[in-house]
Image (cartoon, rainbow, N blue to C red):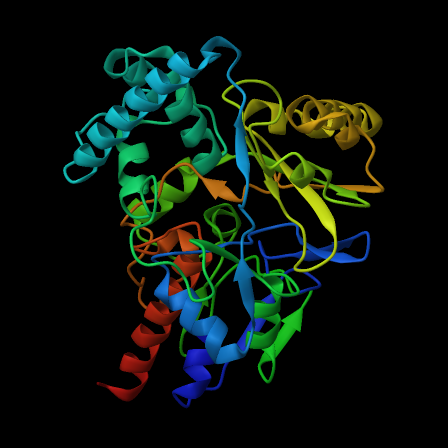
Amino acid sequence: MCARRLVEGGARVAVLEARERVGGRLHTGTLAGAAIDRGGQWMSVGQPRLRALAEELGVASFPQRRAGIAVIDEPGAAGRLAQLGAAWATWRATRRITALMRDPPDDDGPLDAWLARTIPHPAARARIAMHAELVFAAEPAELTVRAYLERLAVTGRFAPVGPELPGGGREHRFAGGAQALALRLAEGLDVQLGVQVRAVAELAARHVVLAVPPRAARAIAADLAPEARRFLDGARTGAVVKCFAAYDRAFWRDAGLSGEVYAPSGLVRAVVDASPPGDGAILLAFVVGAAARAWGSRDPAERRAHVLAELARFLGEPAAHPIDYAEADWSAEGCVYLATSPSWRPAHGTVHIAGTESAVAWPGYMEGAIEAGERAAGEVLRELTGR
């Protein structure tokens, strides 16, 4: 995004990409002949930059399928009365947390202890903890209260506000996968693949933009301000594994289910319908936190069996028999950061910072990546033109 805006402003730009592909944490694969998003995938209400970019690039989107009943797996909250009580307590908890986002307390204590003190209803507390796990791909004990509140305040809170997206729904996916955005952006640019930058020393260019995650920036020798370097050295990441199962038909819809599942405990924390538009039937299960970090040490057949057993428990026995299965393990790479910092934003002389973690709004999301790229491009163009 930064390179595209710089070229539009008249600058000569080279993009040095360490991978053998563009897209970074956007990565489209295939399963049973259909596109799947192994990395980031959703556009939400309240993300105007992403919506405008998709329209500019001609990348079509479609609503996330949510028709039907969602399953909430809470063995301790069975029964209509218990469910109503949990829903009421959860609503009160989200209202209180939302109010605190306006002026987050200076509290670097662990989130799990804070939730235990402030949310007495056990099912409501478990639901809020599960939401935090899904947002941060980490367990509440790993998060601070301040980081939790600050991140939620700039990433849509519990439910992004605003009208539905064109075509309906509050979340959309991209036709052909979200990586199509990066591929379209790269067209016409000087992109050099497989080039791993290890240091920024004497510059042949007048400016350099680091449009990389904090973990990658930490490995690059560059003259950064001490507070920025401290942020990089202390940056911690969550862990997430995406598990896809394809079927010959969407059997869950026969039972009036949406394919959505939310589970405050167990291996799989959430499931969504990841089917392509039209025909096709794919479920996507999320494994996060400690279970995701240990994923690579487990036998692949055991992992698959465990995920499918969870899907069958949630949605019925047919879920245990997919026609295809795939995993995308982001735990080693660190795709979700537990905290951001204003220090990871200002320019350091001729070295400018982009990457989604440097965004003011929606850090860690595609929307934040666009904002950061446009901001960095603006900084460079102002220095080049003197305006």
Left or right of 255: which side holds 376?
Answer: left
| Residue 226: x %, y % from top left | 31, 47
Note whether 10 is above or below 337 in the view shown: below
Residue 274 is at least partly visible in this image: yes
Note whether 72 is above or below 74 in the view shown: below
> Is residue 381 or residue 329 the one in the foreground?
329
Note whether 326 is above or below 45 in the view shown: above
Residue projecting furthest to the left: 103
Left or right of 121: which side holds 39?
Answer: right
| Residue 53: x %, y % from top left | 45, 73
| Residue 22: x %, y % from top left | 63, 65
- Residue 328 image-quadrant placement: top right
- Residue 97 image-quadrant placement: top left
Q: Residue drawn at (57%, 57%), measured in percent from left and top?
A: 198
Q: Residue drawn at (45%, 26%), measured in percent from left and top?
A: 130
Residue 1 is at least partly visible in this image: no
| Residue 81: x %, y % from top left | 38, 13
- Residue 157 image-quadrant placement: top left
Q: Residue drawn at (51%, 54%), measured in percent from left and top?
A: 42
